Image (cartoon, rainbow, N blue to C red):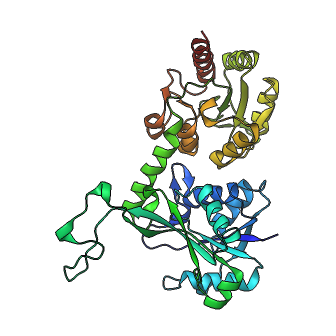
């Protein structure tokens, strides 16, 4: 079997945007978007090659269910401002066996798994020595001497008659082990092209790039909105949804949480209607566990920091689509889920950023009947659809 191995280089230091690789984009660390794409692809193993301990700890906690995700410490000489990516690849190749080496860039969060698989196919089936991702652009390029580089300005083509040209977007590079040993470069030999959508041309280096990429990514997640599918499964956050989000301590140091009893009836009504009820929270709280057991909620996910990652996995495993999901959350770690779900619901006292992304802003506040109100909305929505 041909072994395909990905490296995602992640440097702790970043001058353009401080801590860029772990800065939150739509409520998730930037690197998690490309890591998700790699996990969903046909790659055999994925290495996070990093000198950032916070990234390492985060992934060990959040991605423990993915066996093909691994770590390698990035040596200091490969992580300086002047170090080339090739220096990282050479160091990596000395320590890991592979047949195909795939370089994935965290600064390209719009990369989908299908394009990674397309690159693997070019090398495995069409026998290219290497491959890279490109986008097609219809821009006309001039050099500094005022000379056109890719067209004749005296015979300017109409856009519909101009095929454009292909440029690297910096997202994906692949090469066989044999060719890498010859070139010591990410590319070499016969090179195949992976054509990606034009919006993936954005590569994050400066803050303006970040804002553009975030808006484009948000637009993608919103593709499920306006769906006419029945809601088959609902995911609830806990703090700020089941509770007010406040924490009280007893003298012995124990935490106290207050739940609304009417929310329990909302959960029961959903279950009776055949709608799966899930609870997903960043806390690993025995109080929450006990309350959900009393409500007979079996699908309980505790201590989850990257909710979108887990939710994506659960949806794929269940055979459902995002359009059949409702999500109720109040803070930025719920943002990607709120955007991607067929229906995203936010309590009245959710943070403003979340309310701007919501499909529905509920009238109730966290801990004061939000779960019951959300349940009634879901039941009414399905009922109207089925008339």
The residue positioned farthest toward the top in the image shown: 387
Q: Is residue 153 visible?
A: yes
State the residue in front, 271 or 201: 201
State the residue in front, 231 or 189: 189
Residue at the location (43% across, 36% down)?
356
State the residue in front, 378 or 38: 38
| Horizontal and vertical percent position of residue 137 | 37, 62
Q: Is residue 162 above or below residue 328?
A: below
State the residue in front, 352 or 42: 42
| Horizontal and vertical percent position of residue 26 | 51, 49
| Horizontal and vertical percent position of residue 47 | 70, 69
Where residue 179 sits, quadrant-wise, is bottom right
The residue positioned farthest toward the bottom in the image shown: 182
Residue at the location (49% across, 39% down)?
222
Residue 359 falls left or right of residue 256:
left
Where residue 75 sits, quadrant-wise, is bottom right
Q: Is residue 246 visible?
A: no
Residue 293 falls left or right of residue 182:
right
Q: Is residue 96 above or below residue 196?
A: below
Q: Is residue 264 above or below residue 356?
A: above
Total residue callouts: 0
Q: Is residue 67 above or below residue 382?
A: below
**Quadrant of the image for the N terminus?**
bottom right
| Horizontal and vertical percent position of residue 136 | 42, 62
């Amino acid at each position: 079997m041909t072994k395909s191995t990905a490296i995602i280089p992640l440097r702790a230091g970043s001058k353009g945007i401080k801590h860029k690789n772990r800065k939150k984009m739509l409520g998730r660390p930037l690197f998690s978007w490309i890591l998700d794409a790699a996990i969903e692809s046909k790659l055999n193993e994925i290495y996070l090659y990093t000198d950032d301990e916070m990234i390492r700890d985060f992934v060990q906690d959040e991605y423990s269910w993915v066996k093909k995700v691994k770590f390698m410490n990035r040596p200091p000489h490969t992580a300086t401002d002047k170090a080339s990516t090739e220096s990282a690849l050479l160091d990596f190749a000395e320590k890991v066996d592979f047949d195909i080496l795939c370089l994935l860039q965290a600064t390209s969060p719009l990369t989908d798994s299908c394009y990674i698989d397309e690159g693997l196919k070019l090398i495995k089936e069409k026998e290219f020595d290497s491959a890279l991702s490109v986008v097609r652009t219809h821009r006309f390029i001039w050099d500094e001497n005022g000379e056109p580089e890719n067209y004749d300005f005296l015979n300017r083509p109409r856009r519909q008659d101009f095929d454009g040209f292909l440029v690297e977007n910096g997202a994906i590079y692949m090469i066989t082990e044999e060719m890498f040993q010859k070139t010591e470069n990410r590319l070499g030999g016969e090179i195949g092209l992976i054509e990606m959508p034009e919006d993936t041309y954005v590569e994050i280096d400066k803050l303006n790039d970040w804002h553009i990429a975030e808006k484009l990514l948000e637009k993608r997640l919103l593709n499920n909105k306006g769906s006419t599918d029945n809601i088959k499964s609902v995911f609830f956050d806990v703090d700020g949804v089941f509770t007010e989000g406040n924490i009280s301590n007893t003298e012995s140091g124990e935490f106290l949480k207050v739940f609304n009893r009417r929310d329990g009836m909302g959960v029961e009504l959903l279950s009776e209607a055949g709608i799966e009820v899930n609870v997903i929270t960043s806390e690993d709280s025995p109080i929450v566990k006990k309350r959900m057991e009393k409500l007979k909620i079996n699908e309980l996910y505790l201590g989850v920091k990257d909710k979108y990652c887990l939710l994506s996995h659960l949806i794929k495993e269940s055979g459902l689509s995002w359009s059949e999901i409702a999500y109720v959350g109040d803070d930025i770690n719920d943002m990607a889920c709120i955007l991607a779900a067929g229906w995203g619901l936010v309590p009245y006292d959710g943070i403003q950023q979340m309310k701007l992304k919501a499909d529905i802003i509920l009238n109730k506040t966290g801990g004061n009947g939000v779960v019951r109100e959300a349940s009634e909305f879901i039941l009414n929505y399905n009922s109207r659809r089925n008339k």
